Each structure stands twice: as structure tokens, then as C-alpha cells.
Amino acid sequence: MTTLFVDGDACPVKAEAERVATRHKIPMVLVSNGGLRPSSNPLVQTIIVSEGADEADKWIAERCGPKDVVITSDIPLAAKCLEAGARAMRPNGESFTAANIGQQLAMRDLMADLRAANPLGSGGAGKPFGKSDKSRFLDGLEREIRAVLKG
């Protein structure tokens, strides 16, 4: 059975993911360290993990598998999900794949090294998440769900 896992901490598309899961009648598991209001939707389960770095990521990585879809911005989590046979995508609709995950992990590590080398540099918050991002996410999630269900 297909499950939609959402790395819920700071995920800007929880409501959109819930709509897609409901339309396809698949369970959605929203995992976080707390602070999320549980959904009244019977298809949505909210899991609160213990405090600590990467606890939500560990929980998802241990449970996802083939035919599952994971929504996360965390590249190492996406890599673990792909290894488990799940599909993974960012909240902006971009898919993580076997073909691109290595490059994304390398870029993440490079950026971490650059930030460490210049602790006074401006990190910047990045561009705001807008309607076009949500639209790309909905298109991408629909593609991923259909591909999994088609099997």
C-alpha cells in the first residue's frame, strides 16, 4: 500500500499534500518534533517524535519503502528514502532521483564547507515560497503518486 510521508517540520505544503492524498485515498503520515495541529482527516496521521536532531528524518527513513512517496527538503533523508525504494521530492515539486541525488549531496556538502569557511558571510533566507512553487509542487506530487499507483 502506498503511503505519503511528509517531513513536517517547516514544510510549506502540508495542506496541499493532504488534498492530493485525500483525492487518491492514500494515507498520509505527517512527522515532526511537535508544534503541528493534528488534522481531522482520517487519512492523515500525525507523528510527534522526540526532540533531537534528525529524529523525524530517522522515523521516516526507517518506515518508507517501495510504492511510498516522501516530501522533504532534507537531502540526506531523500537519499535514504531512495535507497529504500521510495520516491522523494522537495516541497517545490522537484524530484530526487537516483540520477541526481549524488550531485545534490555533494553540493550540500560543498555549501556547508563554504559556510564554515566564512562564518561572517550572509546566509540569507532565500526567496519566499510563493503560489508558483505550490503549483509546481502539486504537479510534481500528482506525477509521483500516479507513477507509484500505476506501479
Image (cartoon, rainbow, N blue to C red):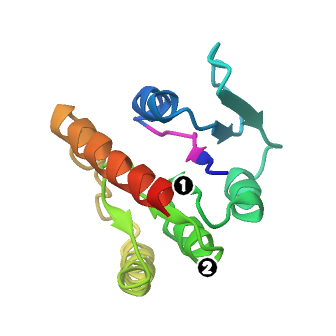
SS state under label 1: strand
Disc 2: CA contacts within 10 A as few (<14), some (14-19) or many (>=20): some
Residue visible at 57% across and 40% down in the picture: 9
User: Which percent across, then down, holds residue 42?
Assistant: 68, 20
- Would you say the residues marked 1 and 2 are in contact, meaning their CB atoms lie under 8 Å apart? no
Please state which amino acid type lies under the numbered disc 1.
Val
Look at the image and tell me whether residue 129 can be seen: no
* x and y, in percent, of residue 134 in the image: 27, 37
Numbered tag placed on residue 35 in the rendering: none
Left or right: 143 with respect to 5? Answer: left
| Residue in the image at 33% along x and 53% along y | 143
Q: Which residues are magenta?
A: 5-11
Front one among 21 and 121: 21
- At 77% across and 63% down in the image, what residue appears? 62
**Horizontal and vertical percent for residue 116?**
45, 76
Q: Quadrant of residue 32?
A: top right
Amino acid on which disc 2 is placed: Glu
Query: Which numbered disc flags the more N-terminal residue, 1 or 2?
Result: 1
Relative to 101, is 96 above or below? above
Q: Which residue is mark 2?
A: 83
Of 80 and 18, the residue lying toward us: 18
The residue at the far top in this view is 40
Q: Residue furthest left?
A: 132
Q: Nearer the viewer, residue 131 or 124?
A: 131
In the picture of the structure, the residue carrying the numbered disc 1 is 70
